[in-house]
Amino acid sequence: GLLREVEAIQASPVLGDVYPHDAYVSRLQRQLLQDTHRMLLNTSVPLLRWLPALDDGQGRWQRDHMEDAGHPNSLGHQVMFEAIDLSMFDPSNANSLRPKQDEFHP
């Protein structure tokens, strides 16, 4: 797959996390969002962890972070950027490009 192709060229893959959507109103939609987030956390690939920073606890955007149902506004983009652990890109950091445990608990 794509991750193997990235590793084959001796690059380090990084995944972007899932993020909320205001049309997620059913329990199943929230559960799928949270399950996908947990699955991404359990990969060996570093993750840009956006869901814990943006989610209202119900799979939807925190009100001040959304432009429309499916997209962040400027503040939401800023929160996404600030949620990125920049130390994962520091080659002098022994833990760089390794996944970290998440503090998000659905």
Image (cartoon, grey):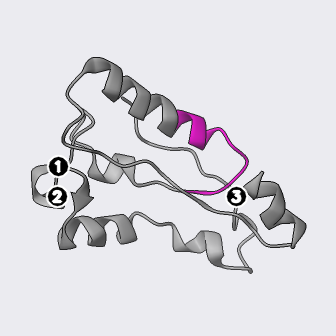
Secondary structure, mark 3, is loop
Q: Residues within 10 Å of mark 3 (few under 14, many from 20)?
A: some
Name the residue located 79 percent from the left edge and 73 percent from the top edge: 11
| Image mark for residue 30 | none
The answer to whether residue 70 is left or right of residue 52 is: left
CA distance separating discs 1 and 2: 7 Å
The answer to whether residue 49 is left or right of residue 79 is: right
Q: Is residue 45 magenta?
A: yes
Residue under pointer 3: 98
Residue under pointer 1: 62
Secondary structure, mark 1, is loop
Residue under pointer 2: 66
Location of residue 34 in the rendering, given as x and y in whole percent from the top left corner: 42, 32
CA distance separating discs 2 and 3: 29 Å
CA distance separating discs 1 and 3: 28 Å
Name the residue located 20 percent from the left edge and 73 percent from the top edge: 74
Name the residue located 64 percent from the left edge and 57 percent from the top edge: 46
Q: Which residues are magenta?
A: 38-47
| Three-letter amino acid code at the position of disc 2 | Met
Location of residue 69 in the rendering, given as x and y in whole percent from the top left corner: 18, 50
| Three-letter amino acid code at the position of disc 3 | Arg
Q: Residues within 10 Å of mark 1 (few under 14, many from 20)?
A: some
Q: Is residue 84 magenta?
A: no
Secondary structure, mark 2, is strand
Location of residue 4 in the rendering, given as x and y in whole percent from the top left corner: 83, 56
**What is the quadrant of the C terminus in the image?**
top left
Q: Earlier in the sequence, mark 2 or mark 3?
A: 2
Q: Residues within 10 Å of mark 2 (few under 14, many from 20)?
A: many
